[in-house]
Each structure stands twice: as structure tokens, then as C-alpha cells.
Amino acid sequence: MEHATAGSSFAALAYLVAGVCFILALRGLSSPTLSQRGNRFGMIGMTIAVVTTLVTHVPMQAVGLVLTGPSGVVSATGPLFARIDFVTVLEILAAIGIGAVIGITTARRIAMTDMPQLVAAFHSLVGLAAVLVACAAFLNPIAFGIADMVIPMIGQPFAAIHGVSRIEMGLGVAIGAITFSGSVIAFLKLNGNMGGKPIMLPGRHVINLAVLAAILLLIAYFTQDQSAWIFWTITILSFAIGFLLIIPIGGADMPVVVSMLNSYSGWAAAAMGFTLHNSAMIITGALVGSSGAILSYIMCRAMNRSFISVIAGGFGAVADTSGGGDKIDRPWKRGSAEDAAFLMSQAEQVVIVPGYGMAVAQAQHVLREMADKLKEHGVRVKYAIHPVAGRMPGHMNVLLAEANVPYDEVFELEDINSEFAQTDVAFVIGANDVTNPAAKTDKTSPIYGMPVLDVEKAKTVLFIKRSMGGVGYAGVDNDVFYMDNTMMLLADAKKMVEDIVKSLD
């Protein structure tokens, strides 16, 4: 008993230390200058949590002493000590090793442009893990310590799952299934397997509300009756509602969806932590869930979206009446790398607006080189970051940090927008929707109401784009292309910037 108490105290203390490390990790990730330290705290905390779980949950085999005499066995004692079940330990270590190899290989091979879909894929795995744990707990609740064996007067004995555990199990499988199917749809949209335009189902809000109400009612009924059909119906409906919530959401709003799915995965992990009686999972899941929800709320405010509509699904989604690429026949001006180099070298201030096109071309390093050249010419250089530039929150910040762009040169939308009117050159590299003034004027546009960077107010706009035929992720054309103060630089972003650097020399 004393040994068990000591083991429990050790686990509680270790999980507390891990939780503190996770909090410090979140604190560090809130600032670019502290992000590396935050990642280290996160790794330390996760290592402590994993090792503690293995040490305190390794299967043990009881070993006793048998006394024999001349005539054979005469007596046997009770268990003297516990022996580690090395076969099970090897299985656990093998599973960890396989997962580590997959994770390391994926992380080394994945390009920064594919990071958003990788994040969505990881969220789906967290959701699926929660579903599998809930299913295992439902099928064998005695092994999880969440049920008592009941022997009725007539009939077969059965495991009666505790009422609180049924609530935890129902919520865990529901949130996990929603996270999984929603993340799969997000992955397909981000990866280009599905179109970025919203997919509208007739009566989708009525259908979503009906399915959500059915899930909640079934979870309530599950607390009174643990029949298998109830549990599996909750699971199937939750998979379905995750699909229904995400398909109406367009590409321009996808970064908010990624952060919300991150929140869902955290709550699913927390719910399963209660089922497994693992305080580390509860702490970690709650931190991920709450931080993801806060990030989603901040981004919704930055994009002028309703937080409730994010949860309901289909926010920012309207019928596509903008005409798509019908405007590309309007007159526009084309420039060269030499033109761009001359205009920027004569400027007092240049504001660089990076977008997903920069990420695709991997142009962040040569872009920083261009900025360094401009500063040698006495030009003041700043970077303007939109909250949803790229495909996930902070995408552009990560790319610029990778290129060692000074943090004090990077500004968020609300801090830089007022400066465009006094800026000589706005240099837009691969950003479309986040600079589209239709968000301010066209009520039929799918991005209407989303705050955008006011690049059109600059004296000159240099806009790097592969061709005039393409449109942004939201599927709408950009009026900035055709303005008198805009010069289009049609080329691969990296090649164009390299040519500008040569011209600056």
C-alpha cells in the first residue's frame, strides 16, 4: 500500500511538472523571440509525461514462492514481488519507435508549403485516437477501471459503466469523431483534393442542428442505458457532423478552421484523459483546447467573423456570384525586374506583403536578401502580415523567421494598415485574397467583411503573380491588378525576386 501511494504521488508530481512545462511552452510560442524556448519546454514536458505514464503503467506479473518436499508440493506462499512483463514493454517500445520514425521522416520531408495540411492531418490522428480509446473503454470497461461487475438475479453478469464515465466517454467519442472527419475535409481542401470554394448543401443549418441535437440527446440517454447501439450511433453521427460542418467553409476562412480543429482535438484528448484517469492528458488537452479556442476567437475578430458561426460551420460562405476570373480582360500594366528595382531603390519606404505564393516558391530567403539590398540604398523596409496569409495561423511569420527576418520589421495588419497611404511602394509577393478591396465593397464576395491590407493606397503597388489567369484561394479576382498605380510582375516569385536583387546590384 505504501509503495502504491508513493507511486501515485510520484506520478502526480511528474504530471504537474509536465503541465507547467506545457504552460511555459505556450507562453514561449506567443512570441517569435521565445518560440524556440517554448518548443524546448514542450518537448521536455511531453518526455516527462510519456516516461511517467510508462513507469506507472507498465504491466507487472505477480511472482510467488512454492515450497516442495519429498512427496511433492506441500505449500505455496502469496505473491512476494512483482516482475515486469517485458513482452508488453517491448510491444510498447516498438509502437513508440514506429511512431517516432514516421514522425521524424514526415517532419524532415514536408515542405513549409504543405505544413497546413500536415497540421490538419495530425489533428485528424488525435481525433481518431480519442475515438479508438473510447471504443476500447466501451468494449472492455473493467480493464479501464470505469465499471463494476454486476451479477443480476436472472441473466448473464455484465460490466456496469459508471455514470460519470459514460458522460466522459460519450463526449470524448463525439468530439474525437468530429475532429477526425472535419480535419480530413480540411486536409483535402488544403491539399487541393477538394476545391477551395464553399460546398453548400440545401438546408445545411437545419441538418447540422438536428444532428447535433441528436448527438446530445443520445449522450444523455447513454447515461441511463449503455446499450451498444446508442454508443455506435453517437460515433457515426459525430463522424457525419464533422464532415457537414467543414465542407461549407471556403478557402479564405480555412486558417480559422485549422485553429478551431486544433481546439477540438485538445478537448477530445482531455475527455479521454478522464476516461484513462491520466491527469497529464487532462492538463494537456485542456491547454490545447482553450488556447485553440482563444486563437480562433482572436482570428475571428481580426477577420470580422462571428465566433459562433465558426462552431456552427459554413461561416463566411455565400453563393459565388463574383464572377471568378471574368475580370481578367480589363487593362493592366506589366513591369519587369529592372522596373521594380528602380522604383524600390528610389523609395523612402517599402512595405512587403508576403502570401501563400511566396511559400510555394520558397522565396523567403531571397526576399530577405532583397530587403537587405534595399536597406543598403537607404530604403526603410517593413513586412505586413495578414492574420490569414497562408493556410494556417502564423504561416508567414514562421517563413520569415526561417529566413532570419528581424522581428522588429514584421507588423500585423492593425499596426501597418494606416501606413500604406504614406508608403512609396507596396511589394505584394504571392498574396491575393488578403489584399483584395472587394472585401470592403462587394457584398456578394465570399470574402466580404474580412479586413484586408490596404495596399492599393500606396503610391505604387508591385504585384508578383504567376499569371493573370489565376485567382486567389477564395476563387475571386482582385481589383488591385487593374489599378493605375499597380505594376504586375508575372513570373515565379523566387525567380522574379532573384532578378530584382541582381538589378539592385
Image: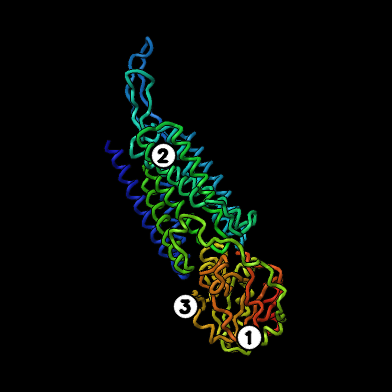
Question: Which of the 4 quarters of the picture holds residue 404?
Answer: bottom right
Residues under numbered marks 3 and 1 in contact, where contact means CB atoms less than 8 Å apart? no
Which numbered mark, 3 or 2, is in the foreground of this view? 2
Would you place residue 384 above or below residue 96 in this image? below
Q: Residue at x 38, y 49 (%)?
A: 282
Circle 1 residue: 344
Dot 3 or dot 1, earlier in sequence:
1
Spatial CA span between label 3 and label 2:
48 Å
Spatial CA span between label 3 and label 1:
22 Å
Which corner quadrant holds the N terminus? top left
Which numbered mark, 1 or 2, is in the foreground of this view? 2
Residue 368 visible here: yes
The amino acid sitting under disc 3 is: Asp
Residues under numbered marks 3 and 2 in contact, where contact means CB atoms less than 8 Å apart? no
Circle 3 residue: 415
Which corner quadrant holds the C terminus? bottom right
Dot 1 or dot 2, earlier in sequence:
2
Dot 3 or dot 2, earlier in sequence:
2
Would you place residue 302 above or below residue 12 in this image? below
Camera-nearest residue between 357 and 499:
357
Q: Residues within 10 Å of mark 3 (few under 14, many from 20)?
A: few
Residue 49: where, in percent of width, then height?
Answer: 41, 49
Residue 150: where, in percent of width, then height?
Answer: 33, 25
Give me the disc on residue 218: 2
Q: Residue at x 38, y 37 (%)?
A: 221
